[in-house]
Image: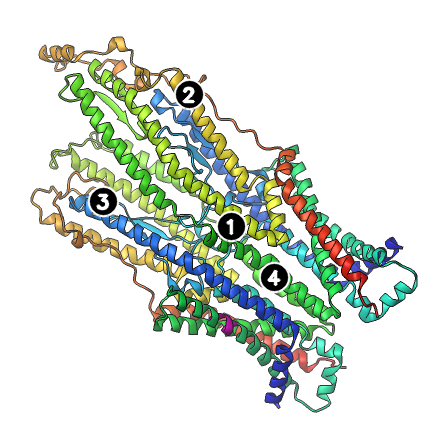
Amino acid sequence: MFKILLIKEIQHYLYGLRFHVSFAMVMLTFVIGTLSFVPSFRQANENHLRYATEQHDALERNSKNATVAAVSLSTFALSPKGNAIISDCSGQHLPDKIVYSAFNVFEFKVSHNNLNPLMKTGRELNWAFIVSVVLSFVTLLFAYDAISGEKEDRTISLMFSNAVPRGVVLLSKLSGIVLVVMSMALAGIIASLLILVFSSCVQLSGVFLAEVGAFLGITFFLITLMAVCGLLASVLSSSSNISLLISLCVWLLFVVVVPNTAVFWANTVFPIPHADEVQMAIRQGRKSLNDNAPQGSWSSNDGNPFWDRHKLRADLQTKLLANEKQHRDAYYALMFSQFDNTRRITLFSPIAQFDYMNEAILGGGYLRFRKNWDDLHLFQSGFFNWFRDLDAKDEKSPHWFNPYESLSTTRQEVEVSQIPVYTEQKAGWGERFSAIVLYLSVMLIYTTVLFGVVVYRFQHYDVR
Amino acid sequence: MIWLIAKKDFILNLTSSRFVIGFLLCLVIIPFTMVVSVDGYKNQMRVYEVDRAEALKKWQEVKVYSAVRPEIVKEPEALGIFTRGIEGNMGNSLTIRLGEYPLLLTGHAGTRDNPLLNAFFSIDFTTVIAILMSLLALVFSFDLFTREREEGTMKLVFTNGVSRSAFLMAKFLGVFITLVPILFFSFMLSTLIVVLNPAIAFSSAEWLGIILLFGAAILYLMVFILLGMVISAWSKKSSTAIVVSLLAWVWLLFLVPDIAYYSSQSVSKVAPYDNVLYSLDELDRVFREKTDEKWGEIQKQMGLDGIGHWNWSGGYDGYDELYGCTWETNEFHRRLNAWREPARLDNADKKWTFQKEWLDGLQRQERTRQVMSWLSPSEIFQQIASSLCRTSPESYLNYMQRIREYRATLIAYFHGKKLFESFSYFTQQDPKTFLTIAKTQQMEEEGFFDSKNFKVPPYWEGSYYLPLNLDDVPKFTFQKQNAAGSLKASLGLVVGLLSLGIALFLVVIGVFQKYDVR
């Protein structure tokens, strides 16, 4: 019985106008999105390559003096990722550069280098965007009149005259919608993959295909949840017009309202101090250290590393760095905590759940940034140890570590290849799956609870 | 008769669930959006006040003309509360330098202290209006004809001798007078949030800007009502009309803008600014090398072995401040500046060719995006709104152009007073008190400096001098565009939106004339 009903449902949808129009729209978006992605990804790769070359040249110049290599600020820039066609994970809005030296990880930057500042930033036209905005909408459009529409057409009462269990009807409708919408997603993804193959833009490696598979998996969960929402709207009313309005409200709530209120919650529920207040605290600390520093702390003599005032200078500079680091690190911790907490609030929206799951499976976005931020802190202590060991071997060095200047530590030349350079370690599958658990659990609980309500309502639905 | 039908539709609409839901949606979404925008604006204003005070303090402490590098702090645009435009992409301040043309504002960017929050999707009031009003217009108009046809009431109407065009007008009017109160309520709610906030004070020009924005929103609403009517007139069934209407809505509101954004980047490519920076760094390197050469040359001309300084502060963009130095050192710096500062200006001109090319590329790309996004009425409306609220790229570029003009005025001032060739460019010390090297050597030989009673003359220290009186230095002023100017700037787009409305109206008349009412 289920099979017959399912085939009937699928045929009903496939021959309908909404499928034809939606399919054309989805395919067109996938194709245009991929065609736009190819040149921009190439350009981003070229830019990154040039940036890396410049960084290497700077390192080569700095290698003439080991201390210069240690105190000079290096910038680690996130490289473009081929899986950004699946989802950019809000990467263009998140920090993509981290500044560090052997003495500290200073700051992160949101670089707008590749973005046109005269343009209002748009959302990436990638697979995740198409699924979360277009396909979620299309799913509701398929589901909103699945029950109420049949009631208006009086076909549902006819169906139940054949003693069909209500649960089977519901399940066949749900499966039909999910299969039809998933077929659209699959067709779009295949078209997109074909373009990527022919353009030789992205290598279809095993990892990439595994990511595509995982993406299809979470797409399935999202579409199922949205279909359940549509069915809920359908069983809540006997009029398809009301069902439609409920569906539209649900979609607006998930896609526009909840994400749009994130900044409101962040500022009101999880406020953090203003950036200039932190800057002021740093300035005050700096002033106090300068005022209380022994006289001659700022003196220098470039020709004589052992000049005793260099020790005072190194001490003062170390204290200044510690002062800045203390305030900045505390502020960064607050920023991360504010961001994490706000994300938890937005979990109310399945679209947000879907986005965070994408981030986890692709190892991108905030997950990628935080991993690099944490890894860079570990790397920095290793970098400092390397410098300290090098300095210890040099008899011409007084070993007075100054985090900003090359005055009182080793001035020996080093091989460029010996200077530690941070390289990104991609998040492993274990890390990715552990990151996904929370979001997937929320989505599954959501789906189960809502489907339970749909079943309950449908059991009591007046089909006359 | 037109009014009778329109009134009937209006009353029916008022009691419908769509009206209640539409009203509630506005009631929920608009306050959230406005509170976030107002909060952002207040933060911008706070940063503006802090930065302005700091810039003023720096200005009041200037003691030499080589430190005259005015800092421009841009006042946040109050109407940005309604339409953010590109405000969030830009910084808020810029220091006028001789060695570089003002390109884009730097300083505090955007409105948020935590840059991570930019990852959250956030929309402004105009976008909310664009999304909600278009949706409501379609939801109210998709079944204007199909429902009457399905219920058989349309035949009945036409048996009473009502003309088709009168019926069409009445239908349009019915939806229009239903939605205008919701639109009006949305504007009232948002302005109420602004008015109730004591930290925000709108000028009359800004209120006029909001009234004009309301006018544009009405025009936008009409376009979507007409679009819904066209779809309804083309469809035989309401179920078909609603599917087409909603898919068209998603296409026009969510896909066309993003497609235009990404396609424009492929069609009109711009290299990243890092590439420009590489060229600028190279020019600066050459300039530094030439300066070093000139340094040696002047030293040689003056027969000096080296340049000694008693009290010298140096910095970026030609800043030098000298006190207690010998006549030779001061003369050396005077001669160096007479060559170096005009050369710095020439170098800035060379750098500007690269920067301008990049800026032109950005403008071209943005223009391409704008034109491509005209496929969506919502984008036309948003462009009108950002123009009226002075947050459009054009407004921003006008501001930057004015800053460049100011830089030229400042340079003319430097030239006019022959400051580059003067001692006052880098010191306030009276040239009569400069000691020659021979004199200082003689004093040294006589043990003058070793004497226990030796005290540095006060005029050898910077703290001895009062800040310069900079009253005659040109000041930066910027006259904000008034409402009429903003309207003039967006007139083409307003005409475009109006033309689209007229075209849709003609189409609906044409289609409805052949509509089978049976």
The answer to the question of whether label 3 and label 4 lie on touching residues, with beta carbons closer than 8 A, is no
Kindly report the secondary structure that dominates the magenta region of the rendered protein: helix
Range of magenta residues: A185-189
Task: Note whether residue B324 is visible.
Answer: no
Question: For the residues marked 1 and 4, what is the alpha-carbon distance in whole angstroms?
Answer: 30 Å
Where is residue A211 drawn, in percent x and y? 40, 71
Task: Note whether residue A346 is visible.
Answer: yes
Residue A71 numbered tag: 3
> Is residue A399 toward the left or the right of residue A231 in the image?
left
- Residue A145 or B376: which is nearer the viewer? B376
Residue holding disc 1: A267
Q: Is residue B252 above or below residue B469?
A: below
Question: Which quadrant would residue B384 be assigned to in this image?
Answer: top right
Secondary element under disc 2, as helix, strand or loop, is helix
Residue with the most extreme top position: B432
> The C terminus of chain A is located in which quarter?
bottom right
